[in-house]
Image (cartoon, coloured by chain):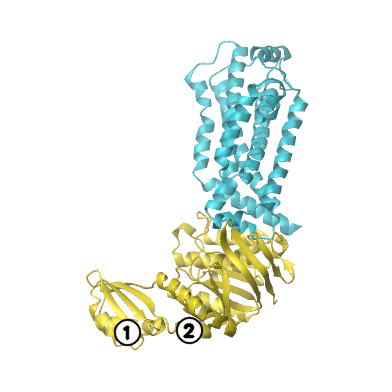
């Protein structure tokens, strides 16, 4: 049992080293801090409600575009880069179950992605509400507002990483497959009426963003109507859906990784 | 602990390309050389033995257990792959430590094993440097160390001597020989006969995806003695060297190219040329940049071996 723990930690460390020593982390970090420029380029709206709307819009850019993109970059590189550098054989030829290799890699990616996204969202919060002096509407406080945004970033990071892990274990060109998925499922479908939108993670993240467990319900209602949103699921439905997507996708990618033959592909 | 590896009707295709076919063999303790030209199927054989790829047909049994997708058995194997496969920004020590920890050792234990192993292979001074600053020979030794650090029963080494300097080569050959003598099952692949010969007398010849022969090196060496090998020498004004080499009994011909800057020597006994070359170069005071056994002629050697004496080999060596 301890042996398994040690080997899992070793894979975690290797993956972390791989991610942190790659140039991609600088690129992702830079892109993650770009939305905060919005607040510096234009003054905050006069009213607290408009200020909240602008803040929510910027957060939505994170969940709709930046998180999936960063998750795709990391999830697709976990296997592909090891195959390209032909180091995957080292991991597969160790007495560690293959599913555990993937899970350890997943958590290393999740750690990096959540750290980056939480840092940039915190910076956004400080920049907008403190440095630029925007005012929060009644019923909203800094700590819960920031806490909710961070919780969604963590939930989004895990669910997107899990979804793209499945894609990366299935396809050699995971980046292309992931981009197609991100465009059609996580962008186009989220605005399609009826049940179709429920196939995307962004739909649930958006629902959670619109319905925090604090604040003014009537304001939330007005925003939903203003955005022409069809049916917004409850917080618990959205949270459980994201959790299930994450778990199912991790299990699925672990199964695929266990039975696929990666070494042969890299040799041939 | 002695371990037996058994190949039963083993075959592997990559789509319509044959990687290996009809392999029935047993490897016992000691060093066994896997000899064959590039693309012969050596790496496929070693990947099958280490359970990295699934057989299309047949099976590989380690002490009676199928190897494919059996992580528990992987702990008994140390694998040194061909080519450069590294986490380049790690130090040598970090690389070997992490890969040893993957065998279930704590980081502390793994590091102690890694240090011991790297020191034994002459890497004491360089183990703290990043791998991307290593020479080819140092990288080979680092790869070898990660295969060895967890003290496996089976060692599978794919072209471990490629790119090593003479000192590193000697070190690795001695280490491999010692491991074989200590009762470990060691499989070493190479496309150079005298490399294998320095480590073991037991050899398996692979060519065009088939196991063509298995037996002692000396018998194959005898067959090769009648086949002219080609050596390429690059340097300045090699004409006197070409003339001097013609006086050696085993040299069939010498050819000068590029205004005497490149010399091709055909010989029935490559070793006899290699033996006298340093002395000749010194006495003639010639500047030599490179000496290389031509790979293309090696392919021809195997074709020669397989075409003409295949039946004889099977009869005498199997």
- Could you say which is closer to the camera, residue A156 or residue B163? B163
Image colour for chain B is yellow
Seen in the picture, residue A31 relative to B100 is either above or below; the reply is: above
Residue A267 seen anywhere in this rendered image of the structure: yes
Horizontal relation, residue B271 to residue B33: left or right: left
- Mark closer to the observer (2, 1): 2
Which quadrant holds the N terminus of chain A? bottom right
SS type, badge 2: helix
Q: Indicate the position of residue B46 as horizontal and vertical percent values.
A: 59, 67
Horizontal relation, residue A196 to residue A171: left or right: right
Q: Indicate the position of residue B258 as horizontal and vertical percent values.
A: 24, 68
The residue to which callout 1 is attached is B279
The residue to which callout 2 is attached is B223
**Mark 2: few/some/many CA within 10 Å (<14, 14-19, 20+):** some
Q: Indicate the position of residue B95 as horizontal and vertical percent values.
A: 56, 59
Image colour for chain A is cyan
SS type, badge 1: helix
Q: Who's the residue at 33% across and 78% down the image?
A: B265
Which quadrant holds the C terminus of chain A? bottom right
Residue A144 seen anywhere in this rendered image of the structure: no
Same-subunit check for callouts 2 and 1: yes
Horizontal relation, residue A262 to residue B232: left or right: right
Q: Chain of mark 2?
A: B
Seen in the picture, residue B205 relative to A107 is either above or below; the reply is: below
């Amino acid at each position: 049992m301890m042996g398994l723990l040690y080997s899992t930690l070793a894979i975690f460390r290797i993956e972390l080293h791989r991610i942190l020593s790659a140039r991609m982390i600088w690129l992702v970090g830079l892109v993650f801090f770009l939305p905060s420029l919005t607040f510096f380029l234009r003054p905050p709206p006069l009213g607290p409600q408009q200020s909240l709307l602008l803040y929510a819009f910027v957060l939505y850019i994170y969940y709709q575009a930046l998180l999936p993109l960063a998750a795709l970059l990391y999830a697709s590189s976990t296997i592909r880069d090891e195959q390209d550098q032909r180091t995957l054989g080292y991991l597969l030829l160790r007495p560690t179950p293959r599913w555990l290799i993937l899970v350890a890699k997943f958590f290393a990616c999740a750690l990096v992605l959540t750290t980056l996204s939480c840092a940039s969202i915190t910076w956004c919060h400080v920049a907008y509400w403190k440095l630029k002096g925007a005012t929060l509407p009644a019923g909203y406080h800094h700590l819960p507002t920031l806490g909710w945004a961070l919780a969604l970033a963590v939930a989004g990071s895990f669910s997107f990483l899990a979804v793209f892990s499945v894609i990366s274990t299935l396809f050699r060109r995971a980046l292309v497959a992931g981009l197609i998925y991100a465009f059609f499922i996580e962008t186009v479908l989220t605005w399609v009426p009826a049940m179709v939108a429920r196939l995307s993670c962004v739909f649930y993240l958006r629902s959670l963003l619109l319905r925090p467990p604090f604040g003014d319900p009537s304001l939330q209602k007005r925003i939903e109507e203003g955005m022409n949103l069809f049916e917004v699921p409850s917080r618990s439905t959205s949270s459980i859906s994201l959790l299930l997507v994450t778990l199912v996708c991790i299990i699925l990618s672990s199964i695929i990784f266990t039975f696929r033959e990666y070494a042969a592909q890299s040799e041939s | 602990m002695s371990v037996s590896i058994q190949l039963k009707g083993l075959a592997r295709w990559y789509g319509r390309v044959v990687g290996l076919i009809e392999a029935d063999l047993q490897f016992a303790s000691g060093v066994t050389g896997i000899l064959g030209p590039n693309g012969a199927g050596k790496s496929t054989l070693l990947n099958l033995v280490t359970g990295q790829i699934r057989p299309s047909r047949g099976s590989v049994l380690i002490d009676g257990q199928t190897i494919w997708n059996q992580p528990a058995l992987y702990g008994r194997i140390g694998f040194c792959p061909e080519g450069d496969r590294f986490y380049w920004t790690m130090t040598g020590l970090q690389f070997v430590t992490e890969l040893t920890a993957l065998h279930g050792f704590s980081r502390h234990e793994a590091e102690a094993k890694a240090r011991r192993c790297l020191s034994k292979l002459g890497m004491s001074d360089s183990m703290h440097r990043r791998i991307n600053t290593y020479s080819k020979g140092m990288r080979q030794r680092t790869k070898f160390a990660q295969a060895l650090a967890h003290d496996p029963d089976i060692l599978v080494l794919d072209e471990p001597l490629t790119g090593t300097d003479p000192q590193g080569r000697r070190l690795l050959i001695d280490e491999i020989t010692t491991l074989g003598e200590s009762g470990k099952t060691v499989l070493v692949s190479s496309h150079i006969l005298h490399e294998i010969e320095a480590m073991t007398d037991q050899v398996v010849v692979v060519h065009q995806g088939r196991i063509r022969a298995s037996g002692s090196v000396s018998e194959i060496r005898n067959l090769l003695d009648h086949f002219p090998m080609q050596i390429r020498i690059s340097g300045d004004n090699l004409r006197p060297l070409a003339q001097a080499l013609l006086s050696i009994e085993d040299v069939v011909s010498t050819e000068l190219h590029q205004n005497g800057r490149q010399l091709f020597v055909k010989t029935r006994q490559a070793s006899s040329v290699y033996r006298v070359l340093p002395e000749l170069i010194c006495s003639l005071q010639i500047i030599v940049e490179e000496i290389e056994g031509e790979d293309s002629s090696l392919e021809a050697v195997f074709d020669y071996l397989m075409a003409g004496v295949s039946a004889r080999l099977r009869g005498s060596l199997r």
